[in-house]
Amino acid sequence: MSIHHLIDFNDLTVEEWKEISELATDIKKNPEKYSDRCKGKILATLFYEPSTRTMLSFQSAMIRLGGEIIGFDNPGNSSVSKGENLKDTITIISSYSDIITIRHPKEGAALAASLYSRCPLINAGDGGHFHPTQTLTDLFTIESTKGTLSGHTIGLCGDLKNGRTVHSLLRALNKLGKNTFYLISTPSLSLQPRITELLIANGNEVHEVTSLEECMDKLDILYMTRIQRERFDSEEHYREQSGRFILDTKKMAMAKSDMMVLHPLPRVDEIAEEVDFDKRALYFRQAQNGIYVRMALILKMISSGVTDDTDIYRYRDRPKVHACPNKACVANTEKYLPSLTYEIADGHRACKFCDTQLD
Ligand code: NCD
C-alpha cells in the first residue's frame, strides 16, 4: 500500500479500498489460509478511551493471523498517568511493535501520534473526528449485502455532530459513489456544514430532517448512532438531547422490506431490542465483519514495515503548533507538535489535526 499510516479513510485510494475489501472477502471464506501470516509480529493496541468491539476485534484479528498483542486499555495503568506525553509514548511503543492502533479522546491525536511512529499506525478513533476502520466495516457490510456503494438512499440518525463513525462513513461514501442522504438529527446535533457542503459539491442529494418518520419509507439503509454522552459539556445538555430517536418495530413497519439497519454499536436506547429479531437488523453481522476487514488491513499495512525514520524530521523546521479554536483538538494539549495546516476555500486555512477553520 502507498500509505504508512491510516488516519482518515480518504488516505486510501479507491484501488486500495478494493484490495482490502477483496482480501477481507477471501479471509472470511478461507480463514485458515491466513492463520500464520503475521507469525512473529506484534500489534500494540493503545486505547486512551473505552472500547469493546474495536480493540477486541483488532486483537482477535492479529491473533487469528498468528501474531501477538501488547498494549493498554486504561491509560491510568501506563506512564500516561505520570504525565508522559503522546510523543514519548509512541516513540517507545513503536520500537516495541510492528504495527500500532490507537484510540484517543482528542481530535487529531492519531495524526499527531503518527508523526513519531516508527511503525505503521492506525487510527481507531480520535475524539469526535474520524474512525476509519469502523468505516471499512460499514462499507464491507453494505457492499456485501447490496452489491454496490452507490445509488442508495441512506439515512443517518442520531448524533451527527459528534459521531466520528458518521464523519468517516460520509467522507468515504462521497469518494466511492453518489447517493441520497437523509440526515436525521436535532438541530443541535446536526452534521458539520463542511461535510454537508462536500457531499452536495460532489453530486450527492442531501436532506436534513428531524424525525425518522419523515423518511423511513424511502430508505435503503438506515445507520443509527448513539448520542455521544462523553462529548457533551454537561450532563444536563446530554439529557436534553438523548432519547429523541428510537427505532422500534412500529417504525420498522414503515420501511422497505430490504432496508438494512446498521449501527456501529454500542447501542444505548436508540434501537429497541425487539428490532434485533427483524431480518433487516444487520448490526451484529456488521460488528462481526470488523474482524475480516481488520485482518485484511493489518496484512496490507504491516508489509510497509518498521523504519528508523519518523515523519517528524520532515517538519523539523516548522514553527510549534498553532493555537486551534477547537478545544477538543490535540494541538491544544500536546504543545510540542509542529504547526500543520492546509488551505481551504477563499485563502482560509484549516488545522490539519482536526480540520477546524483557523482564519
Ligand atoms: C463507535 C465509536 O467508538 O466511535 N463504536 C465503535 O467503535 N464500534 C461508536 C460509538 O461509540 O458510539
Image (cartoon, rainbow, N blue to C red):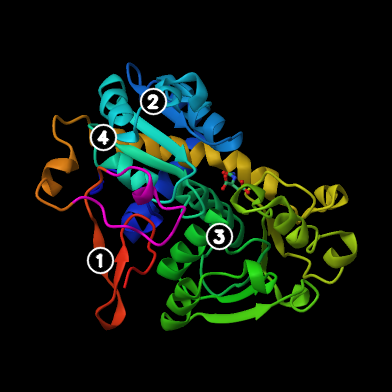
Say if mark 1 contacts mark 3, CB within 8 Å. Answer: no
In x, y percent, where is residue 277? 84, 48
Say if mark 4 contacts mark 2, CB within 8 Å. Answer: no
Q: Residue tagged by mark 2?
A: 43
- Residue at point 46%, 79% (across, down): 197
Q: Residue tagged by mark 3?
A: 166
Badge nearest the viewer, 4 or 2: 4
Secondary element at image label 2: strand
How far apart, in angstroms, are the residues tagged by discs 3 and 4?
Answer: 27 Å
Q: Residue tagged by mark 4?
A: 117
Task: Single out the residue that lies furthest toward the right.
Answer: 250
**Up-down relation of residue 175 to residue 201 (above or below):** above
Secondary element at image label 3: helix
- Residue at point 39%, 47% (across, down): 20
- Estimate how packed mark 2 is, as few (under 14), some (14 to 19) or many (20 or more) residues with alpha carbons within 10 Å: many
Q: Is mark 4 within 8 Å of ligand 1?
A: no
Predominant SS along the magenta part? loop
Secondary element at image label 4: loop
Badge nearest the viewer, 2 or 1: 1
Q: Residue tagged by mark 1?
A: 342
1 or 4: tag closer to the N-terminus? 4
Q: Is residue 93 magenta?
A: no
Q: Amino acid at mark 4?
A: Ser
Say if mark 3 contacts mark 2, CB within 8 Å. Answer: no
